Image (tube, helix red, strand yellow):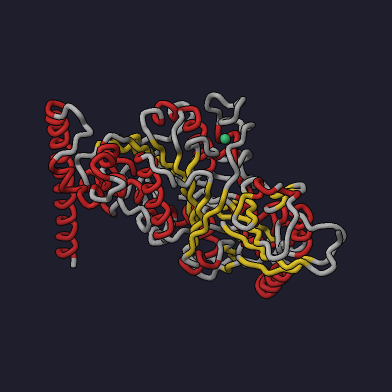
């Protein structure tokens, strides 16, 4: 057994070393080719033998032709977000022979990305998404120039980056970055291909194209932060952003080719559940739009996190609603609930999450249900059967990361006020539990 | 111009807005007969009283829908049709879509 596992470890190490060697050789080759290319190619747009063999299947489409392929070779597309939308968009754009692709992302590859962000492989967990995606794209077509922007797009850098490209793809995952990108595209005069996806639904439109509306024309005010759901909380089926990301690549190509029929002033709604596409007619450009109107109020980039009241990432930051004495550490919970069998644990995640993984003997009551009188009645019955005449009987509340559990504590303190209980939440949630107590517990 | 009979219309929800309406994406409803015409404005009030299952503030703010919800009448943006003042007709399909931001 130990011999066998040692050899598995050795093999993994050898493979990792070989990958590293492969990476450095590929880098070396790229530099060589770039030197060679700058010497021989006077016009980048001229099609090479490789180009013709590679792209013949799309060149023979009459509406594309050699001229169209040359346009694509001379074009540049910026993809913001190398995730569920950005991966398929980048893959198809690279495959199609767009000459220059820019990738923007601040994040690293996480195991929970792999089901939908298919440019990233499991060996690249922890690697920056931009370099992971760039590596996969270069393997697909080493003639395409890939520019890596491993950074958080913000008001200080967005214009400088956006201005280097012809078309921009919004493949981001949060409201603040969507407004930032919209304004940067309006100010720089670039069309913006905007896609989004959640659960089994996707949405797609093109903003700021040929006098069409921009994002602010349609949505002058940002949504209240509590109404915004990200993929981490709402879930998403990988193939759904896959569909939308591929369509984003298609719209970008149509813009590059100068075609009519671009999805501007229209919104495409995709239902993965019903397999339907619904094409909605949107309002025209708003002459009094704050950014693209006749007398714009926004002429330079603003503070978008402040404007939206939300962070420019899809990661929820730590809430702090409770006093420190209303919170327990994983160690305290372990000692009290697991070792001494004190109190009860209420897990306020949705039942789907609870069914994936949960603490033994914890009770699942989703946060929403805490509003219901019958739920509170049920909790009181459990308490009656468990607590006898104890003072300050512990009621531990937990969730995934320790935000919803705080909201739940506030609710329970109201509804269980007369029950002689001490309601506390697990600080940092099950993520903290997995790190401090049980490394076999999934962090999702 | 009073409407003697009720007005049969289809209400649809998407992008997560359905979660506030019993998780049902399609509702066939009959708006009761009323003095004057039904408009989106009066429809929203009716929906708040008759259809909204929870947390109305996540759907309605003041007399209109909250920012981030798009109203589409027969697959066209309600801005093109007079917004709150649009006069609803029998068999209209009114879709409330919450915009998605994930990727
Ligand atoms: Zn605008």
Q: Quadrant of ligand 1?
A: top right
Query: Percent position (x, y) of residue A181?
Result: 48, 36
Residue A294: which quarter of the image? top right
Q: Is residue A408 above or below residue A179?
A: below
Q: Residue at x 31, y 45 (%)?
A: A93
Residue A281 appears in the picture as rendered: yes
Residue A389 appears in the picture as rendered: no
* Residue farthest front in this picture: A62
Residue A62 placement, left or right of A398? left
Q: How many marks?
A: 0
Residue A286: which quarter of the image? top right
Q: Residue at x 66, y 57 (%)?
A: A423
Q: Residue at x 59, y 41 (%)?
A: A284
Q: Is residue B88 above or below residue A213?
A: below
In this rendered view, identify the residue nearer to me: A410 or A46.
Answer: A46
Q: Is residue A177 above or below residue A417?
A: above
Residue A193 placement, left or right of B79? left
Q: Quadrant of the C terminus of chain A?
A: bottom left
Query: Percent position (x, y) of residue A95?
Result: 26, 48
In this rendered view, identify the residue nearer to me: A195 or A424.
Answer: A195
Query: Percent position (x, y) of residue A169?
Result: 41, 41
In this rendered view, identify the residue nearer to me: B68 or A382.
Answer: B68
Residue B59 placement, left or right of A34? right
Query: Percent position (x, y) of residue B9?
Result: 70, 65
Q: Residue at x 66, y 50 (%)?
A: B78
Q: Quadrant of the N terminus of chain A?
A: bottom left
């Amino acid at each position: 057994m130990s011999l066998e596992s040692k050899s598995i470890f050795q093999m993994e190490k050898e493979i990792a070393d070989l990958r590293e060697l492969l990476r450095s050789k590929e880098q070396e080759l790229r530099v060589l080719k770039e030197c060679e290319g700058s010497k021989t190619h006077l016009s980048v747009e001229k099609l090479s033998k490789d180009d013709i063999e590679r792209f013949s299947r799309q060149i023979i489409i009459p509406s594309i032709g050699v001229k169209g392929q040359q346009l694509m070779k001379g074009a540049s597309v910026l993809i913001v977000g190398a995730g569920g939308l950005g991966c398929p968009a980048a893959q198809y754009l690279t495959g199609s022979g767009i000459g220059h692709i820019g990738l923007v992302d601040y994040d690293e590859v996480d195991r929970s990305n792999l089901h939908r962000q298919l440019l990233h492989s499991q060996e690249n967990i922890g690697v920056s998404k931009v370099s992971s995606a760039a590596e996969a794209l270069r393997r697909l077509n080493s003639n395409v120039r890939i520019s890596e922007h491993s950074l958080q797009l913000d008001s200080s850098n967005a214009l400088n980056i956006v201005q280097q490209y012809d078309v921009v793809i919004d493949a981001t995952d949060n409201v603040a970055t969507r407004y930032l990108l919209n304004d940067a595209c309006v100010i720089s005069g670039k069309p913006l291909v905007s896609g989004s996806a959640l659960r089994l639904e996707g949405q797609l439109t093109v903003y700021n194209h040929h006098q069409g509306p921009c994002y602010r024309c349609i949505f002058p005010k940002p949504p209240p932060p509590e109404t915004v759901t990200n993929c981490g909380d709402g879930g998403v089926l990988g193939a759904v952003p896959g569909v939308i990301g591929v369509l984003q690549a298609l719209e970008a190509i149509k813009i590059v080719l100068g075609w009519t029929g671009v999805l501007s002033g229209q919104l495409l709604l995709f239902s993965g559940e019903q397999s339907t596409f619904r094409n909605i007619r949107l309002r025209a450009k708003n002459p009094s739009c704050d950014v693209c109107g006749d007398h714009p109020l926004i002429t330079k980039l603003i503070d978008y996190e402040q404007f939206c009241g939300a962070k420019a990432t899809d990661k929820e930051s730590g809430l702090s609603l409770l006093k420190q004495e209303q919170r327990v550490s994983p160690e305290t919970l372990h000692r009290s609930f697991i070792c001494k069998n004190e109190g009860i644990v209420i897990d306020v995640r949705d039942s789907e999450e609870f069914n994936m993984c949960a603490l033994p003997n914890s009770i699942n009551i989703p946060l929403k249900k805490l509003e219901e009188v019958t739920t509170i009645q049920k909790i009181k019955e459990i308490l009656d059967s468990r607590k006898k005449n104890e003072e300050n009987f512990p009621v531990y509340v937990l969730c995934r990361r320790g935000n919803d559990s705080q909201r739940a504590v506030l609710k329970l303190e109201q509804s269980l006020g007369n029950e002689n209980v001490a309601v506390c939440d697990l600080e940092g949630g099950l993520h903290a539990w997995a790190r401090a107590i049980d490394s076999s517990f999934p962090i999702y | 111009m009073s409407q003697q009979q009720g007005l049969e219309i289809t209400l649809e929800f998407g992008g997560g807005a359905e979660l506030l309406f019993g998780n049902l994406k399609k509702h066939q409803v009959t708006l009761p007969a009323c003095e004057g015409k039904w408009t989106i404005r009066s429809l929203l009030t009716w929906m708040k009283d008759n259809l909204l299952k929870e947390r109305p503030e996540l759907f309605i703010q003041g007399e209109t829908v909250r920012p981030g919800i798009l109203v589409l009448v027969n697959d066209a943006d309600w801005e093109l049709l007079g917004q709150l003042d649009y006069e609803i007709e029998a068999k209209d399909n009114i879709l409330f879509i919450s915009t998605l931001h994930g990727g």
